[in-house]
């Protein structure tokens, strides 16, 4: 059997290897999933401009994201419960990203902890922060990220309240997961996944257990995660975080020009144009359709990144052409991880790199840093 050649093929393989409740946790958007679908569909509408008979030798995809070197303009997005796609998933993905030379972002809601990732990587990684009501806990997370020498903080702004994903309710997926007879059956029919889970001790939220006040077991943890997202969070809290963090700050979840301007006013280093992979406001526009407006409004004042719906190197190329300095991928690396562990993450990145490299050449460009709107034939 040939190895998967596309992200879509990795997804199919992941579906066979990962218990349904966790596969669908990754492969779902909120409510009708219209924004989730638009994220991918809108990339397909953008047409690239084919150029011929130009020198396309000596190509380079190397760039920087918030001043830090990246082998290509792609970073791994923060994703919760990654260690449920594959045992020790965050550690495997972090190592794959490090070897590839791109940033890895650890989610607050990860299974492996900040310290776990620090113990298996040599290069600094990035940490994504959810601001919880318990500000002592938030401070504890920031201090731990600093101690682990994380080189950027990604502050997620679009999840003060949780969008509903029907599949998670139907599958009885809670945080942490409930082990019902149905779920146990799904796990038992995925022996490779089960073996991994039996071998590892990392099966709950590593950043929270033992660090948040009064969290001692699964029941208290479940209640805590449901009650801790802060609906009162506002722009004024960004200052508080910025002061305590003191390093490069990226605000994630910007989808509106006015919010982009507000982010600039905070003095943040970068924004990620994002709708949380279609998992929050169903009916919101796709990220890629909003990118040009946001770049036009603030692109000369702040570094603009984008995520949502990127499934190929051609998609990365389109995002960069429309003004993104970098892109983030969520599901593509999760599918790779679920399908084949660390090798699957590496394969997902290799697929995207090859597609990006060849497509850039076919647009008549040799250096990703020179790619601009000129290579777009039709928006
Ligand atoms: C996410 N995302 C996310 N974002 C974040 O800031 N913190 C988190 O913990 C999570 N968790 C999470 C879990 C899963 C399973 C998915 C799929 C996504 C959103 C993520 O960072 C990113 O914005 C999207 O995944 C990008 O869209 P694609 O690449 O998945 O289409």
Image (cartoon, grey):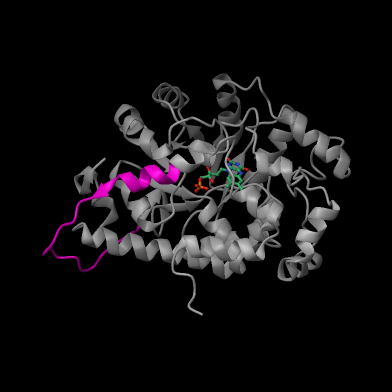
Instruction: Classify residue 72 by image quadrant.
Output: bottom left
Q: Which residue is at the far bottom?
A: 1
Residues 219 and 19: in front is 19
Q: How many marks?
A: 0
Q: Is residue 93 left or right of residue 379?
A: right
Residue 366 horizontal/vertical position (percent) = 23, 60
Residue 142 horizontal/vertical position (percent) = 65, 39
Residues 126 and 315: in front is 315
Asked if residue 313 can be seen in this view, the reply is: yes
| Residue 49 is inside the magenta segment | yes
Vertical comparison of 339 with 210: above or below: below
| Residue 272 is inside the magenta segment | no
Vertical comparison of 245 with 65: above or below: above
Asked if residue 121 can be seen in this view, the reply is: no
Residues 242 and 216: in front is 216
The quadrant where ligand 1 appears is top right
Q: Is residue 258 left or right of residue 292?
A: right
Residue 312 horizontal/vertical position (percent) = 40, 57
Q: Which residue is at the far left?
A: 53
The residue under the point 47% across, 30% down is 284
Q: Quadrant of the C terminus?
A: top left
The residue under the point 68% across, 53% down is 22
Give the magenta part as a residue range: 39-62
Instruction: Classify residue 181 by image quadrant.
Output: bottom right
The residue under the point 20% across, 51% down is 49
Instruction: Classify residue 301 by image quadrant.
Output: top left
Magenta segment, prevailing SS (helix, strand or loop): loop
Residue 104 horizontal/vertical position (percent) = 54, 53
């Amino acid at each position: 059997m040939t190895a998967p050649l596309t992200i879509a093929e990795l997804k199919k393989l992941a579906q066979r290897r990962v218990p349904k409740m966790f596969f669908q946790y990754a492969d779902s958007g909120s409510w009708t999933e219209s924004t989730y679908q638009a994220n991918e569909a809108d990339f397909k509408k953008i047409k690239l401009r084919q150029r011929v008979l130009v020198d396309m030798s000596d190509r380079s995809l190397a760039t920087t994201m918030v001043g830090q070197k990246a082998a290509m303009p792609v970073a791994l997005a923060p994703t919760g419960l990654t260690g449920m796609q594959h045992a020790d998933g965050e550690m495997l993905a972090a190592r794959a990203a490090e070897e590839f030379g791109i940033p890895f972002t650890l989610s607050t809601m990860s299974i492996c902890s900040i310290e776990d990732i620090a113990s298996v990587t040599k290069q600094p990684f990035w940490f994504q922060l959810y601001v919880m009501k318990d500000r002592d806990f938030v401070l504890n997370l920031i201090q731990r990220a600093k101690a682990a020498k994380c080189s950027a903080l990604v502050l997620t702004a679009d999840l003060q309240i949780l969008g509903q994903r029907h599949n998670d309710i139907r599958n009885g997926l809670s945080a942490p997961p409930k082990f019902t007879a149905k779920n146990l059956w799904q796990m038992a029919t995925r022996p490779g996944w089960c073996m991994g889970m039996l071998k590892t001790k990392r099966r709950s939220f590593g950043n929270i257990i033992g660090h948040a006040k009064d969290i001692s077991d699964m029941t208290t943890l479940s209640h805590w995660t449901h009650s801790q997202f802060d609906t009162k969070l506002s722009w004024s809290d960004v200052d508080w975080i910025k002061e305590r963090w003191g390093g490069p700050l990226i605000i994630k979840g910007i989808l509106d020009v006015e919010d982009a301007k507000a982010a600039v006013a905070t003095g943040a280093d970068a924004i990620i144009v994002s709708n949380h992979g279609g998992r929050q406001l169903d009916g919101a526009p796709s990220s890629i359709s909003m990118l040009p407006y946001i770049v036009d409004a603030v692109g000369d004042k702040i570094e603009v990144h984008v995520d949502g719906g990127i499934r190929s190197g051609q998609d990365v190329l389109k995002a960069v052409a429309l003004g993104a300095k970098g892109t983030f991928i969520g599901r593509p690396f999760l599918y790779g991880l679920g399908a084949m562990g660390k090798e699957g993450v590496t394969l997902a990145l290799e697929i995207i790199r090859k597609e990006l490299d060849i497509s850039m050449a076919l647009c008549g460009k040799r250096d990703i840093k020179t790619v601009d709107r000129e290579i777009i034939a039709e928006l």
